[in-house]
Amino acid sequence: MSLLLQSCSSSLQSSNTIECRPPLALAPMVGLSHSAFRILVLELGGVGLFFSEMLSAGRLPIENETVSPFLCRTPAESPFIYQIFTGPGQDILPAVDRLHLLNAQGIDLNLGCPAPALRKQGAGSFMPLESIKKVVADIRAATHLPISAKIRLGRTLDANSLISFCKMLEDEGIDLLTVHARLQGEKFCRKARWDWIGKVKRAVRVPIIANGGIFSVEDARTCLDQSGADGLMLGRGAIKKPWLFADIAERVYGVQQNRANEPDLRKIYFRFIELLEDRFLPERRLGRLKQFTYYFAENFRFGHHLASGVQNSKSLEKAGDRAAQFFDAVERSNESIRA
Ligand SMILES: Cc1cc2nc3c(=O)[nH]c(=O)nc-3n(C[C@H](O)[C@H](O)[C@H](O)COP(=O)(O)O)c2cc1C
């Protein structure tokens, strides 16, 4: 089972097509969707597509690839779509040129993020309609790569305006849409409206990736049933359970994974620390471990001990020691993983 993502750019080149097999994507997440985590999920299997965390189109051309934690990437982290955000009036072309030099396989425009930092710039979900049209048209004219957009359902629940918005994106040359099934102002704890993704799916021709609130194989099945989406994007669920891609790949898409039955959480945690050490400069590691641990700790009944122990650590070594003590205690108590 795979998702073939083809650029609608008129000039045909081999770089126009991405095959995502299985159609399971890692969501763009600031501080979480980075090279170390991508390698971790690659090792655990089941992931078919990567999105970078959001990158400022203004800063991208001057970002130093050799030291930037946002740009470091190995060839194995593929297929790879860089996500950018931009505000009205920003010249997008230097960013697109840079993405070509970085061997991007696709370009994603963030149109869904409601963060206050983006509001100030009129970016993400605050971008005015006319600016969105122009920026998509500008990117389309500048690249043969597939272009995608990540959106939410809008400011209020309104099927007509949601559909006309998505059709506009399609008309301007978008090749893929990711729909996060929440409204602009809704918090992540709110139940995702997967049936609303179905409304978009039935109205447009481009492939749709469904996102929001997928934390288990059962969620993946229900989301696909309700949305009819062509693929799924996992965010926090993948951070909490980096093996969730493999579970969904196997049990929903029938893509056999070569792995042990039960994930070894201790091994996964320390492998992640190793990967942080391998991929990032020392000063970039601890913050990323803390962010990861916040979600990973939810696997345990007393996970707040792991989260707070790591959160209060001043060095990666200290965090590793505290995590080891936590896992020792878990093994002594024979605690099983929480669902
Ligand atoms: C810590 C964090 C950072 C995020 N950063 C981004 C981002 O850079 N770009 C974006 O489009 N969405 C971002 N999101 C939203 C996710 O991509 C995703 O849409 C959201 O978490 C819902 O999916 P989930 O329920 O599977 O987590 C972020 C979410 C979280 C929790």
Image: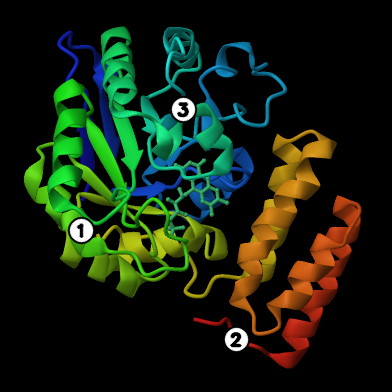
Question: Dot 2, how many residues are within 10 Å of its Cα: few (below 14), some (14-19), or many (20+)?
Answer: few
The reply to whether residue 21 is in sight is: no
Residue at the (55%, 58%) spot, across then down: 239
Residue at the (80%, 69%) spot, across then down: 308
Q: Is residue 177 above or below residue 89?
A: below
Q: Which residue is mark 2?
A: 336
The answer to whether 109 appears left or right of 238 in the picture is left
Amino acid residing under circle 1:
Trp
62 or 132: nearer the eye?
A: 132
Secondary structure of residue under mark 2: loop
Amino acid residing under circle 2:
Ser
In this view, the mark in front (3 or 2):
3
The answer to whether 3 appears left or right of 240 in the picture is left
Q: Which mark is residue 196?
A: 1
Image coords of residue 77 (percent x, y) = 49, 35
From this viewpoint, which residue is outermost toward the bottom? 333
Image coords of residue 38 (percent x, y) = 54, 44
Q: Earlier in the sequence, mark 3 or mark 1?
A: 3
Question: Dot 1, how many residues are within 10 Å of its Cα: few (below 14), some (14-19), or many (20+)?
Answer: many
In this view, the mark in front (3 or 1):
1
Label 2 residue near ligand 1, CB within 8 Å: no
Secondary structure of residue under mark 1: helix
90 or 43: nearer the eye?
A: 90
Q: Earlier in the sequence, mark 3 or mark 2?
A: 3
Q: Which residue is mark 3?
A: 84
The answer to whether marks 3 and 1 mark residues whose Cβ atoms lie closer than 8 Å is no
Image coords of residue 40 (percent x, y) = 57, 50
Q: Is residue 22 above or below residue 321?
A: above
Image coords of residue 256 (percent x, y) = 32, 60
Secondary structure of residue under mark 3: strand
Query: Real-space Cα distance between discs 3 and 1?
Result: 25 Å
